[in-house]
């Protein structure tokens, strides 16, 4: 064997002897530490939070921790948000501290692990401490109930600014309100972190604001100040199905706000008219007859709104007149609608937002448009009937009538050719005269039942 090999061999032997000696030393220290004691004690420098367990037996350590839990951990916490405060009693959430398990971990310090780990612990600096975490649990159901109740108490919904219509048809703004809600994320961990503290047992809750969709400043900036156009039509209150449909459509539109440049669509706003959407059968005009139809009465809503829009000096984008002039508005002042193919649309070309409102009483529906109109401006609608078209007469024989007798079933209706203008005046001086429409309405024939002359043979 060479000299180099012999030296290497000797070094390995010496190193192995050192390891054996160190391991033996560690075992001897363990034996000496526990020798002569009725039960083992916790080594030096072992803490649970600020409670030192050094040199304590199992029972002594448990007693010390139970006192700490009772005097500190189970004492109420204060939860705050601004000037408000709530108290949390840990017992109310079923808090449990695992004292025996914690003491068991404390006793294992310096005894568990490899002999090298134990030796390192013995030779560590006296200033180096071992902290055993305070393990605890809560009743999940009780904790969820506590958090839910706390969230409910803290929660304040946001309130949007509201436009208030005054008796004189001016508009004021009811201020908005910022709401709040408790964000419960990480609340459990923060409570666990606070519970072991002897002092500063106050926890600031994570309460977040809920912003309103429409703030006071936003509402004021819309410039909705007064009624700038209104129109009313009448209906038969005894026709309950028709009244129901009128009310449904008006409610769908009521409160709509249009910004400058925005376009209103009647069909998009009101939606489909069907039994599934809450509309009823009511008389509708088909050809020359009134027949039952889902949504009868809807066109009265669109026509009433159309007139208010004209008087508010808004730009009409799409409008179609009825084939025959309806009775509830002057000829030339109606706007028919059908969900899939005939729409009534208008655009807000003004400088302010506009607010659309509907008001119903026993036998009238009123549409009002609120916004801003320059002082001294007046809008008027002038209707000119250029042609009157008389109705024809349809006679139908009726054997139940005496010869020569006649009974008028339907007086019919005149047809018209109508021109409509919108006139804008400023301080009494006409500024513009705009052609709005030129409509043709066909007449509805007069219907008469006549008696039949009997033959002599009869």
Image (tube, rainbow, N blue to C red):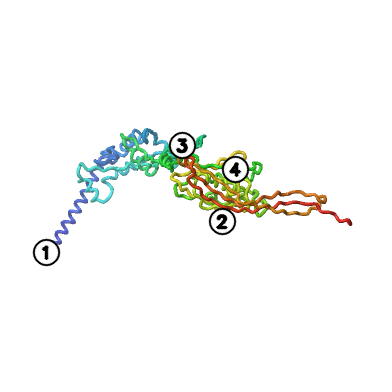
Rendered view: 415 above or below 235: below
Sequence order check, earlier mark of 2 and 4: 4
Left/right placement of residue 50 relative to residue 208 reads left
Sequence order check, earlier mark of 4 and 1: 1
Q: Are marks 2 and 1 in contact (CB under 8 Å)?
A: no
Q: CA distance from mark 2 to mark 4?
A: 25 Å
Given residues 45 and 335, the one toward you in this image is: 335
Q: Of helix, strand and loop, which one carries label 1?
A: helix
Q: Position of residue 351 (x, y in %)?
A: 43, 45
Residue topped by disc 3: 172
Q: Are marks 2 and 3 in contact (CB under 8 Å)?
A: no
Looking at the image, is mark 4 or mark 3 nearer the viewer?
A: 4
Q: CA distance from mark 4 to mark 3?
A: 27 Å
Query: Which residue is depicted at the point 10% across and 64% down?
Result: 3
Q: Are marks 4 and 1 in contact (CB under 8 Å)?
A: no
Looking at the image, is mark 2 or mark 1 nearer the viewer?
A: 2
Residue topped by disc 1: 4
Q: Of helix, strand and loop, which one carries label 2?
A: loop
Residue topped by disc 4: 233
Q: Position of residue 197 (x, y in %)?
A: 31, 36
Q: CA distance from mark 2 to mark 3?
A: 38 Å
Sequence order check, earlier mark of 3 and 1: 1
Q: Quadrant of the C terminus?
A: bottom right
Q: Of helix, strand and loop, which one carries label 3?
A: strand
Q: Quadrant of the N terminus?
A: bottom left
Residue topped by disc 2: 341
């Amino acid at each position: 064997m060479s000299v180099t090999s012999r030296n290497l061999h000797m070094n390995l032997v010496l190193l192995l002897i050192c390891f054996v000696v160190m391991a033996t030393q560690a075992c001897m220290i363990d034996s000496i530490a526990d020798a002569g004691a009725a039960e083992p004690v916790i080594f030096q420098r072992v803490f649970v939070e600020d409670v030192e367990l050094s040199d304590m037996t199992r029972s002594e350590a448990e007693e010390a921790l139970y006192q700490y839990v009772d005097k500190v951990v189970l004492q109420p916490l204060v939860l705050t948000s601004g000037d408000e405060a709530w108290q949390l009693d840990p017992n109310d959430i079923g808090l449990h501290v695992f004292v025996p398990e914690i003491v068991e971990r404390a006793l294992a310090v310096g005894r568990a692990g490899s002999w090298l780990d134990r030796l390192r612990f013995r030779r560590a600096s006296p200033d180096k401490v071992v902290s055993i975490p305070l393990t605890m649990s809560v009743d999940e159901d009780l904790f969820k109930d506590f958090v839910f109740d706390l969230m409910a108490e803290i929660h304040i919904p946001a309130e949007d600014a509201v436009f208030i219509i005054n008796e004189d048809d001016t508009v004021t703004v009811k201020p908005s309100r910022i709401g709040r809600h408790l964000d419960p994320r990480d609340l459990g961990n923060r409570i666990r972190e606070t519970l072991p503290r002897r002092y500063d047992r106050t926890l600031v809750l994570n309460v977040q604001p809920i912003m309103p969709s429409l703030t006071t400043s936003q509402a004021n900036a819309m410039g909705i100040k007064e009624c700038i156009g209104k129109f009313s039509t009448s209906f038969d209150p005894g026709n309950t199905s028709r009244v129901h449909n009128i009310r449904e459509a008006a409610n769908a539109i009521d409160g709509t706000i249009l910004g400058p440049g925005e376009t209103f669509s009647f069909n998009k706003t009101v939606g489909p008219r069907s039994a599934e959407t809450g509309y009823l059968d009511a008389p509708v005009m088909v050809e020359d007859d009134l027949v039952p139809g889902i949504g009868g009465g809807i066109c009265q809503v669109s026509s009433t709104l159309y007139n208010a829009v004209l008087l508010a000096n808004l730009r009409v984008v799409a409008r179609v007149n009825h084939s025959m002039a309806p009775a509830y508005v002057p000829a030339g002042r109606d706007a028919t609608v059908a969900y899939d193919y005939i729409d009534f649309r208008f655009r807000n070309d003004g400088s302010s937002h506009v607010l659309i409102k509907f008001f119903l009483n026993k036998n009238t529906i009123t549409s009002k448009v609120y916004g801003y109109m320059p002082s001294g401006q007046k809008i008027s609608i002038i209707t000119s009937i250029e042609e009157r078209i008389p109705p024809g007469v349809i006679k139908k024989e009726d054997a139940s009538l005496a010869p020569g007798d006649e009974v008028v079933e339907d007086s019919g209706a005149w047809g018209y050719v109508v021109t409509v203008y919108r006139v804008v005046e400023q301080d009494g001086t006409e500024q513009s005269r705009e052609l709005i429409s030129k409509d043709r309405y066909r007449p509805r024939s007069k219907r008469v039942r006549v008696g039949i002359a009997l033959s002599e043979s009869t």
